Structure formats: structure tokens, C-alpha cells
């Protein structure tokens, strides 16, 4: 089991799941934990709650970015702003004031940011890409002290909107409401005039409304954050500390209805494959679909998509994966990312190295077909790149009594590959008709101090065709969670329990049991029954955590997590491995106000111990890390993890446990002043293994340049060198026993991500992303695992050194163990050279709020060989000598709304 814990967040610092320490000394850990509880308990002093009386506008306000409307003459200014960062409760460098009004259909805000006109940073970016001087209004219209709708604008007029949930613990930037803003600059500074249709807010039917309110100002050149309602830096929670917005009376909740049909036309060109009847070199396609947003009530919204298209979405980055585990890719499709936080239910970790594991992984919907065809040399096949999503709908919202609900339903079509064999064609099923269902609810009470909820997922497939019986026919998972806060939300206890249940044919369950998630066939896994006739599999997982997250400079937590051997959510969710019990203790000390040459500083330490369900101690470790910003606005992040020898149950991929030598992981990131037009970020991640079994370096430099307020150019060259003495190659079963073949491997990767953002207006932009990717992997020094748990490292394997024992011929390595001249087994030469270039050029015009025109050019080319030789000039030259795959696309959508 390999772990690298890296935390570069300045806002979240290192979380309890981001780093761990120590052996399985539960008694010693308990004493340490008790000491933390008794040590340095401090209490945040409560600030008085501000209130603002909104006034009713007798006529609609015309947005012009000025305060000359008659309504504004009647409203009063609120200007009691204080610093939040860097100096808590001090007067801001530049003062801010605001006014609020409303009518039957809209909520209005006017924000005045005093400043010198020549000092205002007006950086023009694409929507939701925050930069420059900013102001925001945050509205808790539910008045649940946990949820806020945020409307932020830059001095250049660029909008950003998001939802704060769980009292500030989560922020969802995928929310995309319709609202309007106009900004102007004058001799006194800059001003933002905002209009938010009431249909975009969620509130109850009360005739007299009371909402939570916070107004935020960010002075870019000072990196200074000031607030209308003061919030202590050491306080836990955010929304619960808002001021009050009063005076809003006799407004009615509005049901939101929006329908957005779209048209897509695309053309593709690609290299023609010789003799392949399906490879014509070009294709033309057209597509029509509909996206919709319908308010079932003011608080409940149904989003739907019929025949969706995501052609404007940026491609996944290239990668080389030498592990047995599936690569996790982030979701980029708009329908699935908007409002995704409501469906978030982590398996064990909220953040850190295991935070990707979740009961719902939306990339499962519309995935590439899972059946791999076995084709002879005279066969060709046309296989769909992705499974077609026939339709999807989700219902999300929160009731007046604090019940949050999310329901998602999606159906993907049965997919077929067309196979040609000497001119005779047939269709082969490659993916069954599948239904996906997810339901999540969460209830908060006691002003957000008690939160409980649950989730249920279901995947049902039509696997009647024998060729698809290798897939589970049904997979269900679910869980329940509860959080309790006390002492002004400084302390908390959290619990989470999960289950999974999979059904299918014996072939399907055999595949699940022998997958990299389980490896039930391990010969030393005597505490789990491997059953080739099994037709179902079930398991559980859970997490218990207690900690302190507010009050004073100290933070700490203690966590116990587990995943049983049979737990598996990979049909609807994502989990890498199971059979794990983990205890963690984490402590942090934070300083928010500048001192010496630091602007702020966070120091973190943690320890962890892991066990399997057979009672074996798998690994122990300790981590120290820090994150800081200096007074010159440079940022520094550094850390180190020391890890004991690991009893790696999954190292031989179905074989017995292997004792991996100890390791040291370190990381360093330095970022120069990001206020400048040109800034640089350097990152270096290293890992070294005992007995010289591992030497890994990963270095990158990020260069960002803003020659003007409308252009941003960045380039991130990166180099990875991975030298391992123990890399899995293959497993062979012989009459004399199992053979686990490993090798030394030299992996080198050179890549560079390039971005160009050109913003003509806040609603008109051109974006380019490109990534050349060159990788070479060379396998040498092949070896056989002999005694995987031997105390002496050199006794755990033996090298194939005798030329009579191993030879190479026809692309295969031939092994003759007894030197009798006969090959006992062979394996394919695993060397490879992967060279790719991907790019996207996207022109986006939001010609009216919610309605867009996209022009897209996607480019892809690759050149791969079976050589592990690293030669930059040759590889790059070959890559750019081949014909690329190009896609040109135009997408037009128009949003109709009430």
C-alpha cells in the first residue's frame, strides 16, 4: 500500500485525512488524544449581530451601475465593515458600503467599494473565474444557518455564483443561476448594481421574511478581505454567523421554469486505417437535445436533459498508469457537475488521499462500453466511444423544515459494436441497457448543530445476452451519516456507516472477487471465503470521527475508518481497495495574523496505523507539514511523511502479501506573488524507498503571465522520473506452483499544459488548452518473487540472470527454469513509448443570460511504439509527423424562462 499525503490548500489547510502518523499504539494514542482535549481550549468571542432593513422598490430598478435610481435615495447605507484577513477586526484599508431593496419579482443590491480609480484591478476573465477586485453578497434565504447563495462580481463586471452548504464546509461553484449586474468606476472607486430574480432564490412562504446576510469585499492588491458582519478567524462555521436582513414582506416564492433546446453539428477527420472498412477518414454528425430546469416548488428544482451533448467539454489529461487501479477522472459535464454536492457521500475520507472514493461517481453514467472484443487479425470493429445517455433527471432542494433532498435518475442505451470479418458484418453487444438511480437526503436541526441523513444508489442492467453476463445485473449501496456539534460548534462528533450489495451471474461475481478491489484469491487471505459459484457479494464500511474545529489556534481530530473485504460500490461509485481498518490522529496549530515575516501560518502533524480484517498490521506512518504566506505574498507549502515497512496485501495482484520496504515522501511548493502580472509556482514531490527499491521525482514549474487585463497565458512544464526495483509484470500458474514475475522499471514522463484565456467581455471569451505528453517505460532485471515476507529484502525475490533461463525472441521473454531447453512460460515485452498531444480551442458567447454559442476545435494525435527508449527529439518528431484526429463543432442553445 503506497501513500503520499500532499496538502497545498491555504484556505483549508491540511485536513485530518491528508496526513497520518505512527504505529498501532492505541493506548498511547488515546492518552495523546486526551491531552489534546484538555490542552489550550479557548473560546471565540461572539460579535454583535448586525441587521439591515431592506426597503420595497415601487418600480423596477434599471441597472446602470450607479446609485441614481429613486429607490436608492430612500435606502440607507450600511458601512460597518471590518477586516477578516489579514488583521481581524481592524478597519479596512478602503471602506465599503451597500444598500438592499426588493420588489415583487427581484432582489436588488448596490455595493460601493471606495478606492483610488487608478488602483482598481479590473481583470477580465470568463464567468466563475475570480480575479482582481471583488465584492459579493451572500444570502441565507432559507435562514437555516447552513446554506447561502453567493453572488460575486469583479470590478470588471465578471460574475461568479456558488452555493455555500454545511455552514461553510462546502462550496458548489457549479450552480448557474440567472442574475444581472452592472459595474462602473468613478472618482470614489467602483460600484456594483445587482438584480437577482426571486425565482433564483429559495425561501419559505412566510409573509415576513428574515434572511441571513453577509457582504464581502476583497481588495486584490492588499489581498485584504473585509466583512459587513464580523466573523472571528478562529470560529467554526460561516453561515451561522451572518447578519440579519429584515423588512422583506409579502413576497411569494417563485417557481423556476427554464427550457434550453440545443443544436449541435460536428465534423471529424482522422487517419485512415489500412484495410479497415470502418475507417473512412471523416465523419459528419448532427444532434438535437433539450436541457431543462423546472421548479416543482420554490424550494425543489428538477433538472433534466434529453439526448445530452458535451462536445464543448475539455478532454481528460494524458497519463501513464502502472498500477492495478482504475484512474479517477474529475467530472466536467455540466449536467452532472451542477449541484453535485448534494449527492456527495464519501466512503471514508472527506478530504485527502482517499477522498475520491465515493458512493456516487457520475462518470459511470455514459462510460465507455465495458465489453472488450476478441478480434482475429482479419476482423475490424466499430465500437462507440461512449455509452449514449438517453436521458437524465435530478431533483434537488431543501424544504422549509431543513430537509435537503437530491434524486438522480438516468438511463443509458444498449450499445453495439459493428464487426466486419472478410466483408461479413454482424453486431455484438458491448454495453447493456442500464438504469442509474441515486437518492440523498439530509436533515439539520438545532440551528445546524445536529445533521443526519442517508443515501441510496441502484444500478440495474439488462444482462440477458450471454456476452454481457460478465457484468453484475444489479448493484445497490447506501449509507447513513450523522454529525453533532457542541460548545458553539467548536467540537464535533461524526459517524458514517455504509453498505453494498451486488448480484449477478457466477462469472460476474468471479470477476468482482478477483478484481484489484478485492483479490479474494489471495492464498493467505484465510479470513475471507473465495467462492467461484457465488452469485452475490455484500460488504460494509464506516467512519467515526471526533475533533475540535474552532476556538483558539489549535485544531485536532481522531478518526477510525474501515472497509470490509466484500465492500464494493464501483458500479455507481468509486473505491480502489478494501479490507482495511485505519486509525488516525491529527493536530494543527494556526496563526492567522501577520507576525515576523509571515502573513499567516499553519503547522500540522498526524499519525496513522492500518490493519486488515485478518488482524495484520499493514502500515504505520507519521506526517508533518506546513503552509504559509509570507509578507511579500509568496506562498510556501512543505511536508514529509515517514512510512514503516508495509505488508502490501495487493502488491502481487492476487498473490500473497509482500513486505514493501519503508519509504520517505516529501513535497515542496513555492509560489511567487500572484498579484503580479507574471508569477511562478515551483513544485517538487519526491519519494524514496528503503533498500533503494524506489526513487521517484516529480517536478513542475507553472508560469503565468497577464500582459493585460483581458489576456492570461500559462505554461506548466513537468517532468517525472520513476525508478522502481519492484514493478509487477505478470502471473503464471505452473505445475510447480505460481510464478509472480516482477522487474525493475524506468519510467520517464515529460509533459506541458499550456493555456490561453482571452476575454473580450465578461460574456465573450476564447480559451485554448494544449498538452504534449511524452512517456517511455523500460522494464529490465526481471525477477521471481520467492519469499514475499522474508525479513531480509534480498531473500524476497531472485533475479533471472542466467541467459539460459531467460531469453528474448519475437517480442516475448521466454523463461526456461530447469534449463531443459523447453520454455516453461513466456510473457510479452512490457516496454512501451506513449506520445500524445491533446488540445481544445473553445469560443464561448453567452449572448443572453443562460443562452450560449460554442465554437470548438478539438485536436488529438498519438504515436506509440513498443520501445522503452527515452529520446525526446525522436519521440517529439514522430508525434508531430503523424496525421491528427480533429473535431470541429458548433453548439447553439437558447434558454426560455418564466
Image (spheres, rainbow, N blue to C red):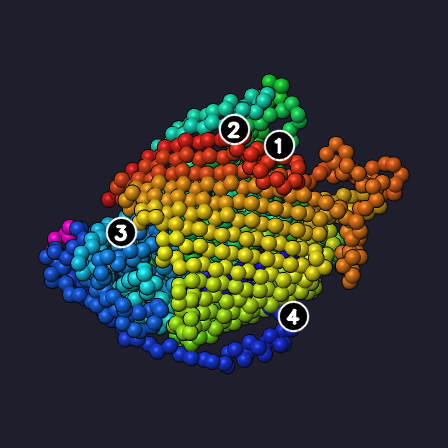
Between the C-alphas of marks 1 and 3, the distance is: 54 Å
Residue at the location (35% across, 61% down)?
A: 147
The CA distance from mark 2 to mark 3 is 42 Å
Which residue is most to the top?
Answer: 423
Residue 60 among those drawn in magenta:
yes
Q: Is residue 553 above or below residue 404?
A: below
Question: Which badge, 4 or 1, is on the more N-terminal residue?
Answer: 4
Mark 4, Cα crowd under 10 Å, few <14 / some 14-19 / many 20+, is many
Q: What secondary structure is found at the residue carrying circle 1?
A: loop
The residue singled out by tag 1 in the image is: 373
- Tag 3 residue: 156
Quadrant assignment, res 82: bottom left
- The answer to the question of whether label 1 and label 3 lie on touching residues, with beta carbons closer than 8 A, is no
Residue shown at the point (58%, 40%) measured from the top left: 872
2 or 3: tag closer to the N-terminus: 3
Disc 2: which residue: 883
Magenta-drawn segment: 57-62
Viewer-side label of 1, 2:
2
Q: Is residue 481 left or right of residue 852?
A: right
Residues at marks 1 and 2, CA–CA distance in whole angstroms? 26 Å
Query: Residue 530 location in percent, x, y?
Result: 71, 51
Percent coordinates x, y for residue 792 in the rendering = 78, 61
Foreground label between 3 and 4: 3
Give the side of residue 451 with respect to residue 621, left or right.
Answer: left
Per the image, the residue denoted by label 4 is 24
CB within 8 Å, label 1 to label 2 = no
| Image coords of residue 751 (percent x, y) | 53, 45
Dot 2 lies on which element? Answer: loop
Q: Quadrant of the N terminus?
A: bottom right
In front: label 4 or label 1: 4
Majority SS type along the magenta span: loop
Of labels 3 and 4, earlier in sequence is: 4
Amino acid at each position: 500500500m503506497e501513500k503520499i499525503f500532499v496538502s497545498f490548500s491555504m484556505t483549508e489547510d491540511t485536513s485530518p485525512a491528508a496526513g497520518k502518523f505512527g504505529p498501532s499504539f492505541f493506548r498511547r494514542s488515546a492518552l495523546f488524544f486526551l491531552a489534546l482535549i484538555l490542552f489550550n481550549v479557548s473560546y471565540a468571542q461572539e460579535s454583535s449581530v448586525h441587521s439591515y432593513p431592506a426597503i420595497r422598490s415601487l418600480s423596477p430598478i434599471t441597472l446602470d451601475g450607479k446609485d441614481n435610481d429613486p429607490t436608492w435615495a430612500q435606502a440607507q447605507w450600511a458601512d460597518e465593515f471590518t477586516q477578516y484577513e489579514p488583521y481581524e477586526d481592524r478597519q479596512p484599508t478602503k471602506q465599503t458600503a451597500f444598500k438592499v431593496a426588493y420588489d415583487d419579482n427581484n432582489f436588488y443590491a448596490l455595493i460601493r467599494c471606495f478606492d483610488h480609480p487608478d488602483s482598481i484591478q479590473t481583470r477580465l476573465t470568463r464567468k466563475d473565474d475570480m480575479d482582481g477586485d471583488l465584492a459579493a453578497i451572500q444570502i441565507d434565504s432559507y435562514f437555516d444557518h447552513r446554506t447561502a447563495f453567493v453572488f460575486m462580481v469583479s470590478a470588471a463586471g465578471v460574475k461568479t455564483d456558488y452555493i455555500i452548504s454545511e455552514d461553510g464546509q462546502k462550496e458548489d461553484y457549479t450552480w448557474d443561476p440567472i442574475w444581472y449586474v452592472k459595474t462602473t468606476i468613478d472618482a470614489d472607486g467602483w460600484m456594483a448594481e445587482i438584480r437577482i430574480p426571486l425565482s433564483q432564490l429559495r425561501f419559505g412562504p412566510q409573509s415576513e421574511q428574515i434572511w441571513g446576510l453577509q457582504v464581502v469585499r476583497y481588495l486584490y492588491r492588499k489581498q485584504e478581505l473585509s466583512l459587513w458582519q464580523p466573523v472571528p478567524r478562529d470560529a467554526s462555521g460561516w453561515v451561522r454567523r451572518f447578519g440579519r436582513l429584515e423588512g422583506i414582506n409579502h413576497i411569494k416564492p417563485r417557481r423556476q421554469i427554464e427550457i434550453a433546446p440545443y443544436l449541435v453539428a460536428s465534423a471529424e477527420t482522422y487517419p485512415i486505417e489500412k484495410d479497415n472498412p470502418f475507417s473512412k477518414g471523416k465523419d459528419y454528425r448532427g444532434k438535437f437535445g433539450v436541457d431543462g430546469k423546472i421548479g416543482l416548488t420554490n424550494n425543489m428544482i428538477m433538472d433534466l436533459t434529453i439526448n445530452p451533448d458535451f462536445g464543448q467539454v475539455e478532454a481528460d489529461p494524458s497519463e501513464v498508469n502502472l498500477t492495478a487501479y482504475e484512474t479517477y477522472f474529475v467530472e466536467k459535464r455540466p449536467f452532472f457537475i451542477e449541484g453535485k454536492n448534494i449527492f456527495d457521500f464519501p466512503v471514508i475520507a472527506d478530504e485527502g488521499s482517499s477522498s475520491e472514493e465515493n458512493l456516487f461517481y457520475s462518470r459511470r453514467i455514459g462510460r465507455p462500453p465495458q465489453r472488450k472484443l476478441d478480434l482475429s487479425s482479419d476482423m475490424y470493429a466499430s465500437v462507440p466511444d461512449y455509452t449514449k445517455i438517453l436521458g437524465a433527471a435530478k431533483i434537488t432542494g431543501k424544504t422549509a423544515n431543513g430537509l435537503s433532498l437530491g434524486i438522480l435518475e438516468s438511463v443509458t442505451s444498449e450499445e453495439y459494436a459493428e464487426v466486419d470479418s472478410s466483408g461479413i458484418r454482424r453486431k455484438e453487444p458491448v454495453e447493456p441497457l442500464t438504469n442509474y438511480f441515486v437518492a440523498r437526503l439530509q436533515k439539520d436541526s438545532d440551528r445546524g448543530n445536529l445533521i443526519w441523513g442517508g443515501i441510496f444508489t441502484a444500478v440495474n442492467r439488462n444482462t440477458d445476452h450471454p456476452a454481457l453476463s460478465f457484468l453484475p445485473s444489479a448493484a445497490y449501496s447506501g449509507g447513513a451519516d450523522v454529525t453533532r456539534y457542541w460548545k458553539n460548534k467548536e467540537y464535533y462528533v461524526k459517524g458514517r456507516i455504509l453498505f453494498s450489495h451486488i448480484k449477478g451471474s457466477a462469472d460476474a461475481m468471479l470477476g468482482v472477487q478477483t478484481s484489484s478491489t478485492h483479490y479474494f484469491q489471495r492464498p493467505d487471505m484465510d479470513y475471507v471465503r473465495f467462492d467461484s459459484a457465488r452469485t452475490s457479494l455484500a460488504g460494509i464500511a464506516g467512519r467515526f470521527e471526533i475533533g475540535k474545529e474552532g476556538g483558539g489556534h489549535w485544531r485536532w481530530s481522531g478518526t477510525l475508518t474501515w472497509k470490509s473485504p466484500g465492500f464494493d460500490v464501483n458500479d455507481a461509485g468509486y473505491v480502489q481497495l478494501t479490507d482495511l481498518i485505519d486509525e488516525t490522529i491529527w493536530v494543527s496549530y494556526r496563526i492567522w495574523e501577520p507576525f515576523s515575516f509571515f502573513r499567516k501560518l499553519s503547522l500540522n502533524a498526524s499519525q496513522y496505523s492500518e490493519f486488515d480484517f485478518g488482524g495484520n498490521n499493514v502500515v504505520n506512518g507519521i506526517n508533518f507539514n506546513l503552509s504559509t504566506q509570507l509578507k511579500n505574498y509568496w506562498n510556501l507549502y512543505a511536508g514529509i511523511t515517514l512510512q514503516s515497512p508495509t505488508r502490501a496485501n495487493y502488491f502481487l495482484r492476487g498473490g500473497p502479501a509482500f513486505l514493501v520496504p519503508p519509504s520517505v515522501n516529501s513535497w515542496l511548493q513555492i509560489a511567487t506573488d500572484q498579484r503580479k502580472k507574471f508569477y511562478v509556482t515551483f513544485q517538487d514531490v519526491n519519494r524514496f524507498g528503503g533498500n533503494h527499491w524506489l526513487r521517484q521525482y516529480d517536478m513542475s514549474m507553472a508560469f503565468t503571465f497577464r500582459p493585460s487585463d483581458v489576456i492570461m497565458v500559462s505554461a506548466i512544464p513537468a517532468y517525472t522520473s520513476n525508478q522502481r526495483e519492484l514493478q509487477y509484470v505478470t502471473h503464471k500458474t505452473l505445475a510447480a506452483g505460481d510464478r509472480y514475475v516482477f522487474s525493475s522499471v524506468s519510467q520517464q514522463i515529460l509533459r506541458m499544459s499550456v493555456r490561453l484565456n482571452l476575454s473580450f467581455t465578461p460574456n465573450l471569451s476564447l480559451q485554448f488548452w494544449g498538452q504534449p505528453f511524452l512517456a517511455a517505460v523500460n522494464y529490465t532485471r526481471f525477477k521471481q518473487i520467492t519469499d514475499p515476507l522474508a525479513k531480509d529484502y534480498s531473500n524476497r525475490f531472485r533475479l533471472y540472470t542466467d541467459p539460459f533461463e531467460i531469453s528474448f525472441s519475437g517480442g516475448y521473454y521466454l523463461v526456461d527454469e530447469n534449463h531443459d531447453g523447453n520454455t516453461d512460460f513466456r510473457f510479452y515485452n512490457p516496454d512501451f513509448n506513449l506520445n500524445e498531444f491533446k488540445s481544445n480551442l473553445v469560443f464561448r458567447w453567452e449572448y443572453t443570460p443562460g443562452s450560449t454559442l460554442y465554437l470548438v476545435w478539438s485536436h488529438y494525435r498519438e504515436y506509440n511504439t513498443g520501445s522503452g527508449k527515452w529520446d525526446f527529439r525522436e519521440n517529439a518528431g514522430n508525434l508531430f509527423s503523424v496525421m491528427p484526429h480533429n473535431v470541429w463543432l458548433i453548439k447553439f442553445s437558447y434558454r426560455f424562462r418564466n
